[in-house]
Image (cartoon, grey):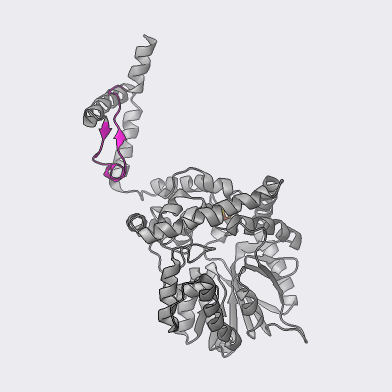
Amino acid sequence: MQISSMHFKARAGEKLADVKLQAALHRLQGNFVKGRADRVAELENFEEIRTAAAAIRDRVINNLDLYLEEFERNATARGAVVHWAETTADVNRIVCELASRYGVRKAVKSKSMVSEECALNDALEAAGVQVVETDLGEYILQLAKEPPSHITAPVIHKSRDEVSDLFAKEHQRPRKTDIGELTREARELLRTHFLSADMGITGANFIVAETGTTLIVTNEGNGRMVTTLPRVHVAITGIEKVVPTLEDLATLLRLLPRSATGQTISNYVSLTTGIAQPGEQGPQHFHIILLDAGRSRLIGGDMQAMLRCIRCGACMNHCPVYQSVGGHAYGWVYPGPMGSILTPTFVGLENALELPQASTFCNQCSVVCPVKIPLPDLMRKLREHQVERGLRPWQERVALALWSWCAQRPALYAWVSSIAAKVLHRLGGAERLIRHLPLVSGWTAGRDLPAPQGKTFRELYARRNR
Ligand code: SF4
C-alpha cells in the first residue's frame, strides 16, 4: 500500500465534506462503541483482565527473543517451517519463492494487515499468481481496487448501495440490494476459488510459544477454508504477536473480540498447529513468516508500549478524529490513534508529520485500549521528537520561539498579552465573536472565537485583590 500520510490534512478536509462517508462512519457508534460497552459490562473483573493482559504483553516484549525461539522450536517440531523476515520486501520474496517452489497459480487469502503492510498482493500478482481475498470486506475492496479503511471492518466506508453497484458490475449479475443476497452471491463465487487454490495465506492474531500454534479470529469462516483446503498454508505475522502459553492466549481472547466488534467471542477461533497428519484434512506444507519491519527497534525506546497492541481497533472506533475523517485520510495501513503512532514509527516521522497531531487528546483511546497503551502520551512524545528534529513548519517554530522568549520575561509577557487582549476585544465587535483570525484561519473557518473582555487574567486578578 502506497504511503500518503503526509497529505493527512488535505485528505481530512476532503473526507469531512464526503456526505456518504459521514453517513457510513455513523455505523461505528452503534455496532462497535455500544457493542463494546455492552460486552465489557458483562465482565465484573474487566479491569483486572486488562491489567493481566498488559502484563502478559509486557512480559513477551521484555523476553521477545526467548519466546520467539521457543515458538520456532515447537512449530518446527510439528512440521511447520519458520522464516524470519527483516523487511516487508523479505516477506514478499519468501512468499513468491514458496509460490514458485510449489507451482502455485492461485492463492486465497484471509484478512491480514501485515500483508497490507507488505503490499503482498502486488508482489504475488507480479510473479504471476492470482490472489483472491476471501474476507467479505477485503473481497469488496479488491473488486473496488481500494485499500482498507479500518483494521477490523475494512469496508466500513462503503454503503450497501455502493456494494450493490460494484457486485452488479464486477459479477455481471442482476443488481441485488439485500445484504443476505449480496453475501450469498460473494460466497458462491468464492467457493470455487477455495477449491481451486494451491496456497492459502493468513495473518495470525497471535502465535503461541509453548505449542508452536498460530491463531486467527474471524467471523465468516473463510479463515478455516484458507487454512485447510489448499495444500500450502502460509501464515504471516509480526514478531510481537507471540504469547507464551495457551492460558495467556485465553486471557487475551477475553478482550480481543469484546474490544474489536463488541462480541463475547468471534464466530470462529482457529488454531493451527503443524501440518496435516495422515488421515487428517489440512495443508501438506505450513510456512510461518515472522516480520520485524521496525518492530524490534521499538524495544527499549519510548514507543515500546506500542508493541502491546493486539490490533483490536477499539481506539479508532472511539476516536473523534477517526469518527470524523475515516481511515483513508491517514494514508497507510493503520489508521486512528494506533496508526498515528505506528505509521510515523514504521515509515519515518518525516513521512507522517501530521499524524501525531491528529488527536484531540481526549484520552478515550487509552481508556478503551484493552492492553492499556497510553496512546496520547506516545503521540505527545512523537510531537516532542518532531520539535527536537526541527520537523515542524518554520512559522510554527518561529512563533513558539518568540512565545518562549517572551514568556521568560514576565513584565514583557504581561504587556504583550494586555495589548493582545485589547486587540481581540475590538475584533469581536458588538457581537463579541471573532469570525476570522489571521494565522489561525483554519480554526476560525469552522467556528467563531468568543472575544475576550479586553483584560488579561492577571489584570482581572490584580483588580479583584485591590
Ligand atoms: S492500540 Fe489498543 S485499542 Fe488500539 S488497536 Fe491496539 S490494542 Fe486495540
Q: In this rendered view, identify the residue nearer to me: 296 or 281.
A: 281
Q: In this rendered view, identify the residue nearer to me: 29 or 68.
A: 29
- Residue pictured at 42% horizontal, 69% vertical: 161
The percent coordinates of residue 271 (x first, y second) are: 70, 71
Does 418 sit left or right of 361 as displayed? left
The percent coordinates of residue 372 (x first, y second) are: 60, 48
The percent coordinates of residue 126 (x first, y second) are: 44, 83
- Furthest residue to the right? 279
The percent coordinates of residue 315 (x first, y second) are: 53, 52
Position of residue 464 relative to residue 220, above or below, is: above
Does 288 sit left or right of 174 as displayed? right
Does 112 sit left or right of 462 as displayed? right
- Residue pictured at 56% horizontal, 88% vertical: 104
The quarter of the picture where residue 395 lies is top left
Which image quarter holds the C terminus? top left
Position of residue 363 relative to residue 328, above or below, is: above
Does 132 sit left or right of 406 as displayed? right
In reply to whether residue 88 is colored magenta, the answer given is no
- Furthest residue to the bottom? 103
The segment highlighted magenta reads 433-455
Which image quarter holds the N terminus? bottom left
